[in-house]
Amino acid sequence: MTDQTASTGLWRGLGLRQKQVVWAWAFLALPILFYALIRFYPTGEAFYLSTTNWNLLSKPAFIGLANFRRLLADPVFWQVFRNTVLYLVIGTPVSLLLSFTVAYHLDRVRLLHGFIRALYFLPFLTTAAAMAWVWRWFYQPVPIGLINDALAALGFPQQPFLRSTTQSLPSVLAPAIWAGLGFQVVIFLAGLRAIPTTYYEAARIDGVSNWTILTRITLPLLRPTIVFLVVFSSIGFLRIFDQVYNMTTNDPGGPLNSTKPLVLMIYQTAFSSFDMGYAAAQTVVLFLALLCVSLVQLRLLRDR
Amino acid sequence: MRGFRGMVLGLAMSIGAISGARAQPVEIEYWQYVFDARIKAMNELIKRFEAANPNIKVKQTNFPYADYQTKIAAALPAGQGPDVVQLFYGWLDNFVAAKFIQPLPKDAFPPQEIEKDFYPIVSAMKRNGEYYGLPTAVRSLALFYNKKLFQEAGLDPAKPPQTNDELLEDAKKTVKRDSAGNLLSEGITLDFPGQDYHWWRETLVRQMGGAPYSDDNRKVTYDSEAGAKALNWYADLQRVHKVGQAGFMDEGQAAFRAGRAAMTIDGSFRLGAFNNIKGFEWGVAELPAGPDGKRYNFASYWVNAITTKATGEKLEAAKKFMAFVTTPEAMQVWLDTVGELPARRAAAETDKNLSHPIYGPFLKALNYSTATVFVDEAGQRQVALDLANRVLIQNQDAKAALAEAAKAEQAILDRYYAGK
């Protein structure tokens, strides 16, 4: 009984502002706790597992940094690392350039503006797996592959696409870029609309060329939008999985690991070979890569 | 207060007495992965089993193949999951080491009788004199051929190729290309991710006089003259003779199903799927013999095992269920529904089955089959796929490609056996 009085007294003793803070923390505690449980705890656990030889069935035993040494000596890891970087350095600039070009011109279109925007956005709403399978069939050789059928009909030689070690990565990347385009276009459009028209009017009165307007007014004022999209799409390309896995299910990440991203390697190591400790070590590397890329980008694109 | 408590206690006791007298049915859980025909067959078996054992209920649970092992590994240590579980023969050591499954009780499953009645490939389930699992059905490979395409090419649809040379000749006659050389229909499918990697490893390598692994399965031995000969013979189907092309129609079985391949090598588990296509006339033949006239085949199987979760009356029920699903009757149901072959010789080699135009070739193969021992099925398969791609896509020399594959696979074996 005395405890209760004491705590009631304590609550009474607080000022209105302090009470608000307590309430705010009480409400915030729930999502933070939940987040800690489903995000931070497993992340910490992954760091621990990366130092064990857990194979899902046995008890994990501590083996120090052996998994990381094995990773550095694994040629597949370096190939996969190279692929992941390629997805990033091709995917992000190409998709941003395309989506900006589309948004820049779409911004000036009045006729059917909403309809065209919806068309661009549609692929973003489609399940990645379904889309990947459709593209997978596009890429098949004659007689079922749409692209090769067209090439053959025009008298060109067939292309191997997914059956080639050089063409397969761009072939997998293309639908991934296409799928994300709609989202980026919409964000760019919002960014373009947010630029006050007075700047443009002033520029026109001064008789400045379109190119100068683009480079001196539009792009600098779009910086926050660009920063957001660069970080967002970089993380997306670093974590690419659905497209690759669905387009190469028979030989995931193949042929000869030429399309395999880090996430797929982690998935296979963990859930096909059940080498959980080694997979956790790969996860730690991916985590560090994502962290570095995000930090570097934020720093480079920061407002000066 | 006291009176009320006494009343509740009395009521509870009388309810307990009633339900105790009614002989509560024991429920056991059975797990297998998702594969329509297998689920259907198991439902039929459960129906028959429950009719014969009204005191036992069997609940079947299924998971997609990709999640299957993960689910088992998550459930059993927590005291959940199956009492009787289906597992791939290659997983046995890991399951035993993790104490997921218990040896089959010798009273119900005497080892001498198992060895007398089942095909010898079942001995892979024996550890220290005890059997840990028994299959209902086993699978082997065979050559599937499209009778209509054979006829169109002027071949006798009743005479499938009997040797590798005949296979090549028939493939050359049945392949179709357009004027620009684009493949329209294959003579034989090339599909390493399908079953060809087994065909190459267990059949072609042996036919050329080699062996894929050492007798104790700890050393890779296909990095040899025989291995290179086998690999070149296989790759030449595409490189030189152009009778097929890896990746044509996406998958070999898809090409065959669509009538765009005259021949394909596949397993008995595919029968159910091919049977469902109307107006599709196909036949089955034993895998062709090699230059020395010898035949080899690859067999694999799923076994049922009793988990460590089953104790007491559940263990008794699980024993009864295990015994039932390995009876000749259950094997016939499995053969008719799934197309997989009975694991008991007596149930398999009936006159009816042996003379069956489709089951016959698969059954004959069981007498000259090997069940490859895998330590990391996915990893070892990947090595084989890379081997084929090096030769077919990168035009690498067979010997160099084999050396690289052997090194990679040996590393997987070494890592596994080092931990034993």
Image (spheres, rainbow, N blue to C red):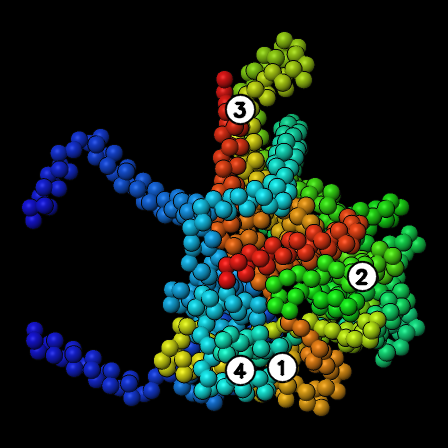
| Label 3 environment density (alpha carbons within 10 Å; few <14, some 14–19, many ≥20) | some
Q: Position of residue A241 (x, y in %)?
A: 59, 47
Q: Chain of mark 2?
A: B
* Up-down relation of residue A249 to residue A85 (above or below): below
Q: Are marks 4 and 1 on the same chain?
A: yes
Mark 1 or mark 4, which is nearer the start of the sequence?
A: 1
At label 3, the amino acid type is: Leu
Q: Label 4: which residue?
A: B325
Gap between marks 2 and 4, in whole Å?
A: 43 Å
Give the alpha-carbon distance from disc 2 to disc 1, as whole Å.
31 Å
Residue B146 in view, yes or no: no
Residue B91 point in image, percent of width and height: 54, 67
Structural distance between the alpha carbons of marks 3 and 1: 69 Å
Between label 4 and label 1, give the one nearer the viewer. 1
Disc 3 secondary structure class = loop
Crowding around mark 2 (Cα neighbors within 10 Å: few <14, some 14 to 19, many 20+) is some
Amino acid beneath label 4: Val
Q: Percent position (x, y) of residue B82?
A: 45, 71
**Disc ID at residue A301:** 3
Callout 1: chain = B
Whether A214 is drawn above or below B345: the answer is above
Q: Are marks 3 and 2 in contact (CB under 8 Å)?
A: no
Whether labels 2 and 4 share one chain:
yes
Left or right? Give the position of B58 relative to B404: left
Which label sits in the foreground, 3 or 1?
Answer: 1
User: Which numbered dot is residue B119?
Assistant: 1
Nearest-to-viewer mark from 2 and 1: 2
Image disc number at residue B229: 2
**Front-most of residues B233 and B140:** B233
